[in-house]
Amino acid sequence: MKRFLLVSKLTLALLVLMNIQGAWAVDMGDISVHGFVSQGYLKTDQNNFVDRTEDGTFEFNEAAINFSLEPMDSLRIGLQLMSRDMGDSGNNDLYLDWGYADYRWKDSLGFRVGQIKVPMGFYNQNRDVDFLRTFVFLPQCIYNENYRAFRTAYRGVEVYGNIPMGSLGDMEYEVLLGTPEMDTDEPLFKGMFQLYALGIGTPTYKDADIYLDYGLASALRWNTSVDGLRFGFSNLHAKVEADSTITGSPYTSGANVSFVWEQEYDYFYVLSSEYLWKNFKFAAEYSRKKSKTNYSYVGLVNRKSNTVAESYYGSISYRFSDLLEIGTYYAENYPNVDDRDGSEQTSNNLMPQKDWTVSVRLDVLQNMSLKFETHFIDGVTDLLNVNHPDGFEDNFILYTAKCSVNF
């Protein structure tokens, strides 16, 4: 709460100092400054989408400010500082969202060095920019909020460019090699230990660490010669490792033992399509992921699994006026394509999930939007064990509301 008040006061002071009167971007000499602030509300009829949503929660907010400078025509330097809270994730800590030096040698070849957004699907790199979409939440079957820290930005190097294709349009490409900064206090990490390590009883863990050995992300985006039509392919190859000391697990007869967990993506690709036509926006994405998971209590137990997961969605939105935009999407997520009905799964959150979403966006001011969204969800694949000590209900409804202001 204190952090939220601090961020709110800093944001308010910044807006006052900028004396915003219709000009929502600030030019400090050669430095451009932009930012946004949002506050939301989450409520579920049962289950916890994040911590405590069954009771309703305002722990759903974001604030960011970014700076950019172009010291020469081919060089851009920029960074964004961000604070966010979503249940037990983020907790309004201030962090570097992205920050890099971008040297564009020519249109077909450029280089970035620093903390760089991961080119995953069409919308991962701008998922923080609420004004660019109709929906409060991007389809979770691909843009899962629980994996945000792992898939949002990597510290490393990137090669990118745009290649003209004549009458066929043009092709954009990106190749990023790096690693993210991962926090052991994130609910995803706690949930992983609960699922794989702790088992039944009342065990605990200490001296925990989680890290990405490597992450290689690549993307192709074909902007066709048909106005508003584009297609894309992106892929992520990565290996994540975690370890800790487990105390009191029945698997280890209560002894203190080292626990090691590894997961490697042989591939994790997304096929994307988007078509803008008049006031309509159509989008569809398909994802397939093959992962190898190994976990062991050193010297006692060693287990392995290989899984292929599949997910996809289709969305449509329509702008009726400067004030009103409405959208909907339908998504399906199958954690194991060899068990589509979930009959062989021992954990509820490895069952298939389907999500039908309806969203209303109101642009009440030029730089202020209100969004109201309802998710009708069958299945609990995207939920975490750590938020459900008493188990899951198979179906639930998620209600969301969000107000965003940008400058």
Image (cartoon, rainbow, N blue to C red):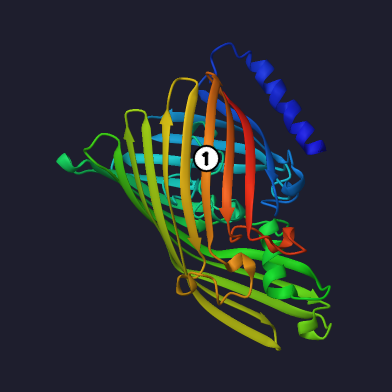
Identify the residue under disc 1.
Answer: 358
Q: Is residue 114 visible?
A: no
Could you tell me which residue is drawn at 47 percent across and 49 percent down? 330
The C terminus: image quadrant: top right
At label 1, counting other C-alpha atoms closer than 10 Å, the crowd grade (few under 14, some 14-19, many 20 or more) is some
Tell me: 102 left or right of 379.
left
Of 201 and 298, nearer the camera is: 201
Could you tell me which residue is drawn at 79 percent across and 32 percent down? 5
The x and y percentages for residue 190 are 72, 63
Q: Is residue 250 visible?
A: yes
Q: How many marks?
A: 1
Q: Amino acid at mark 1?
A: Val
Of 49 and 85, nearer the camera is: 49
Tell me: 295 left or right of 323.
right
Callout 1: helix, strand or loop? Answer: strand
The N terminus: image quadrant: top right
Residue lying furthest top: 21
The x and y percentages for residue 326 are 48, 32
Residue 262 sits above or below residue 278 on the image: below
The x and y percentages for residue 137 are 55, 43
Q: Quadrant of residue 218?
A: bottom left
The x and y percentages for residue 294 are 58, 78
Residue lying furthest left: 167
Residue 265 sits above or below residue 154 on the image: below
Could you tell me which residue is drawn at 46 percent across and 52 percent down? 157
Of 276 and 55, nearer the camera is: 55
